[in-house]
Image (spheres, rainbow, N blue to C red):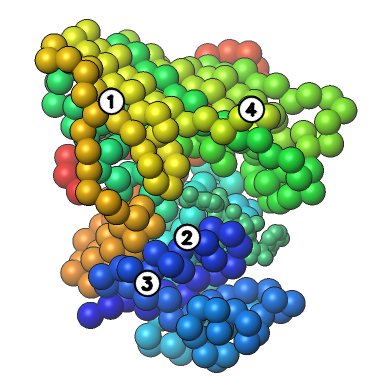
Amino acid sequence: RRVGYAIVGIGKLTADELIPAARTSENSYVAALVTSEEDKGEAFARAFDLSDRDVYTYDQFEELADREDVQAVYIVLPNSLHREYVERAAKMGKHVLCEKPLGMNADDARQIVAACKKARVKLMTAYRCQYTPEHWAARDAVQGGRLGKVKLLDSIHTQVETDATAWRMKQDLAGGGPLPDVGIYSVNIMRFVLGTEPEWVFAALHQPKGDPRFREVEESVAFTLGFPGGIMATGLTSYGAAKTTTLRVLGEDGSLLMDPAFPYDGLKLQLTDEAGTHQPSFPEYDQFTQEFNHFSRCILEGGTPWTPGEEGVADHVVMDALYESARTGKVVPLKSSRKKDASR
Ligand code: NAD
């Protein structure tokens, strides 16, 4: 049995990654596409091995209700549109896989979770890095005590954005700049490897005057998260610095380094402990295929996704507090208490 998906939004991620990934999934396939009127049509259908009838405009979205072969909807739209489309999908009784960040802020994300609960459909936040063997090996090393008592983490996620007109540069469409777009990976993976939630946060941001790209959103954020037991984690994110993605964890008896830590492939993990330094190797995989496989398994066999909507909310809680800290110049305490199971 396989789960049919309707993918909403045909941007670069959908065309280059998601559609090819679904083709190699063991239990998922793309049954329909939802896109804008202008680019709707035969070209898409042909390129993606679908018939014209499988391509819908945003206005025709509700027609998917009658498509029994579409059990799930994958939302790959600008961040401000996630909530509207999750709610519309949930109303039709479709399960929802939603791209990160789940919403525009914690309140928006909580509404998304509530809509899916009310409609009794499953909701998964598409955190692809929580479905890689490298990140699981890092988590196991940290939580299994291999590095000794963990003291410090740091993570960088930067890239250069040149298009001042892109939706990513509009506060109303993106909900922020590099923090919710790429810095979110650092926040998410720090929480994932430690398996705990930060107790306080502190941040500073830079928004250069006169650069049309940063009229509405920040260029860079430097932040610190305080985790239980005095563990401190620092992060850097930017739309103005060359592509860099790293994660480092320092313990009393060893350390680990992922560099690169967050690309679609080619991740590298290096572990240093009493036995020396080595780089474990892993079988080849596709992160997006892993996500499809996992969510479809939850739908077919029953079960909660490893990264449910609540996981998306948890990152928004941290990011909202980081923006508050940058605005006020103060440390912001957090009450969040998201608990997770030990296994996937
Ligand atoms: P994109 O700009 O390439 O595509 C966005 C799609 O939304 C296009 O089909 C566009 O036509 C449509 N759209 C509808 N209304 C729009 C509007 N008002 N303005 C602009 N586009 C509109 O974006 P993308 O890079 O595919 O990002 C989409 C989502 O996927 C975002 O939430 C983003 O954070 C996420 N994303 C995740 C990853 C990942 O690795 N998981 C990578 C890239 C993007």
Q: Which mark is residue 17?
A: 2
Which mark is first along the chain, 3 or 4?
A: 3
Q: Secondary structure at mark 4?
A: strand
Report if the CB atoms under discs 2 and 4 are less than 8 Å apart. Answer: no
Q: Is residue 206 left or right of residue 155?
A: right
Residue at 27 percent across and 60 percent down: it is 294
Q: Is residue 236 left or right of residue 39?
A: left
Which mark is first along the chain, 4 or 2?
A: 2
Q: Residues within 10 Å of mark 4 (few under 14, many from 20)?
A: some
Q: Is mark 2 within 8 Å of ligand 1?
A: yes
Residue 321 appears in view: no
Q: Is residue 342 left or right of residue 19?
A: left
Q: Which residue corresponds to mark 3? A: 23
Q: Secondary structure at mark 2?
A: helix
Q: Which mark is residue 241?
A: 4
Q: Which mark is residue 270?
A: 1
Q: Could you tell me the amino acid type at mark 4?
A: Ala
